Amino acid sequence: MITRLAAVSDAQTIADIVNPVIRDTAITFNAQERSATDIAQAIETLPCYLVAEDVGEVIGFASYDQFRKGIGYARAMEHTIVLAKTARGKGAGRALMSAVTDHARAAGVGSLWAGVSSENPAGVAFHTSLGFETIATLPKVGFKFGRWMDLVLMRQWLDPKD
């Protein structure tokens, strides 16, 4: 398995990976599926968009973008990571997060943030195992499937030198 920068040609495969997560789970509060065009635009504009590939097949992706708008947040990034169902538990997530973290450090990012649905305890455990700490739980900020859900806000401090 390798990690590499995403290419626009990966957009449809990424859509095929993320849309079942959007449609069928509470892992994300987003309820609107993403088109290949949306994803291609994100690949071209986000500061970091990576894929994990196994035997020539894209099996997951990770990206990051500024945590909040404004110059004061320019070194705080929130990441997204999604794996194909068949790729979970095989090291692709750790490989992607290692590559995202390396990219962020090289770019002078101070902190990586994860907003994890409280209905995704495996996501909380995954981030904890990577050194993320829970900073807060924001109650009832997400609404999907006719119910309110909490968001667990987690941070990894990257110890920038300046």
Image (spheres, helix red, strand yellow):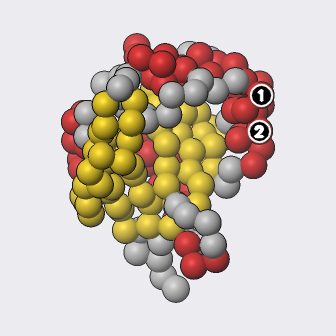
Classify 144 as above or below 79: above
Check whether the beta carbons of the residues at disc 1 and disc 2 lie within 8 A of each other. Answer: yes
In the displayed structure, does residue 153 sit left or right of residue 13? left
Which amino acid, mark 2? Gln
Classify 155 as above or below 40: below
Classify 136 as above or below 40: below
x 61%, y 66%: residue = 69
Q: Is residue 92 visible?
A: no
Which amino acid, mark 1? Thr
In the displayed structure, does residue 4 sit left or right of residue 7? left
10 Å neighbourhood of mark 1: few (<14), some, or many (≥20)?
A: few
89 and 146: which is toward the camera: 146
10 Å neighbourhood of mark 2: few (<14), some, or many (≥20)?
A: few
Task: Name the residue that disc number 2 marks.
Answer: 41
Classify 133 as above or below 3: below
**Residue 49 in picture, x, y percent from top left:** 63, 43
137 and 46: which is toward the camera: 137
Measured Cα–Cα span from mark 1 to mark 2 = 6 Å
**Residue 18 in picture, x, y percent from top left:** 53, 24
x 42%, y 57%: residue = 113
Please give the label number shown on residue 108.
none
Picture quadrant where residue 145 is located = top left
109 and 76: which is toward the camera: 76
Task: Name the residue that disc number 1 marks.
Answer: 37
Picture quadrant where residue 155 is located = bottom left
